[in-house]
Amino acid sequence: GGPAVRYLLRDGELVEYDDARLHVLSTTLKYGVGVFEGFRAYWSQDDQQLYAFRVGDHMRRLVDSMRVVEIDGPQDTDALSEQLLGLVRANGLRSNLHMRAQVFVDSSDGKPEDTGPATVFMAAIPMGNYFGSTGLAMQISSWARLSDRSMPPRIKSIANYQNGRLAMLEARRNGYDAALLMTESGHVAEGAGYNVFMVRKGRLCTPPTTDSILEGITRDSVLHLARTELGLDVDIRPIDRTELYSADEVFVCGSAAEVNHVTSVDRTPIGSGAAGEITGQIRRLYLDAVIGRAAADRGWAQPVYDG
Ligand code: PMP
């Protein structure tokens, strides 16, 4: 079929879907230099409103990402946020959306060390569920999660995604749904596009951001919700592979993945195979938070259209 939406955004200007192009000799295409964000907006049937989730926080991470990989791009997160919401309105979108902001280096004879000219593309495209609700059979990957000594896992550099891609392809080839990667030193890090939590001995645990993970915004939302809505203490600490095998619950979380339970790790079943109690509670709280439902609302869910 044709493009799902009419317009994309290039440096704040609407462009037709097929006109959002990058030169093949750009630094980005030659050397994989670029950063991006992936976020979601949720249509609320009750409110007849579209809510964009934590857009400002995503834009702050985008600016952090540019700083780390040294791309001289725009720094005004409010302006970037407003551009993205303006794009959604220009396309008249009123359904669940996947949104992206991508910063590329569009030099026409690109050198690896070029830091500009930066060009910012944004997209907002209708999207349903990323995963089903049957849970995930996960494999501990034979690929290690890239480490901060070679690449910056905490930010969203496009080059990082080769690492998760290899792990994902390996897992699919072996008959699993998805992969979990460990750090070089053998701690559980994260999946190809999601952070991981486990419940073990009654404690909710997740790896620290110094264990080769993206500083996930959903991870942060889950930490807030678990602490403030469920009154749980969360242990942020290194996690061993075999702790997962004997966990009561394991779940992954991300803007696209939302909160989804893991049914097995390396074919070892986790709990009953259904979503565990804490996972279920956190999933419900999260799906309320994304449409600004009172108990969970922290100004995270931003109305896109005038009331
Ligand atoms: N880890 C990786 C490698 C990711 O690509 C993502 C998706 N952005 C996540 C974790 C989850 O991050 P967030 O909750 O900010 O979407």
Image (cartoon, grey):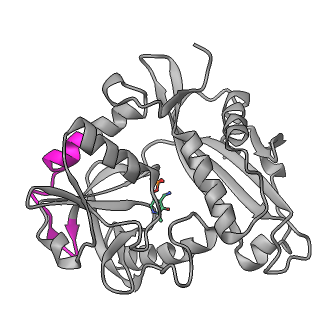
Left/right placement of residue 78 relative to residue 235 reads right
Residue 43 place in picture, x, y as percent: 49, 28
Residue 68 lies, with reference to residue 304, above or below; the image says below
Q: Quadrant of residue 188?
A: bottom left
The answer to whether any part of residue 132 appears in the image is no
Residue 236 place in picture, x, y as percent: 28, 62
Left/right placement of residue 131 relative to residue 306 reads left
Residue 11 place in picture, x, y as percent: 82, 47
Q: Is-magenta flag for residue 269?
A: yes
Left/right placement of residue 78 relative to residue 127 reads right
Q: Residue at x 62, y 59 (%)?
A: 64
Q: Residue at x 50, y 73 (%)?
A: 165
Q: Residue at x 41, y 84 (%)?
A: 143
The answer to whether any part of residue 29 appears in the image is yes
Residue 307 lies, with reference to residue 87, above or below; the image says above
Q: Which residues are magenta?
A: 264-282
Q: Quadrant of residue 142?
A: bottom left
Residue 240 place in picture, x, y as percent: 23, 77
Which residue occupies the extreme top position in the image?
307
Q: Residue at x 80, y 79 (%)?
A: 113
Residue 24 lies, with reference to residue 47, above or below; the image says below
Quadrant that contains the C terminus:
top right
Total numbered labels placed on residues in the image: 0
Q: Is-magenta flag for residue 35?
A: no
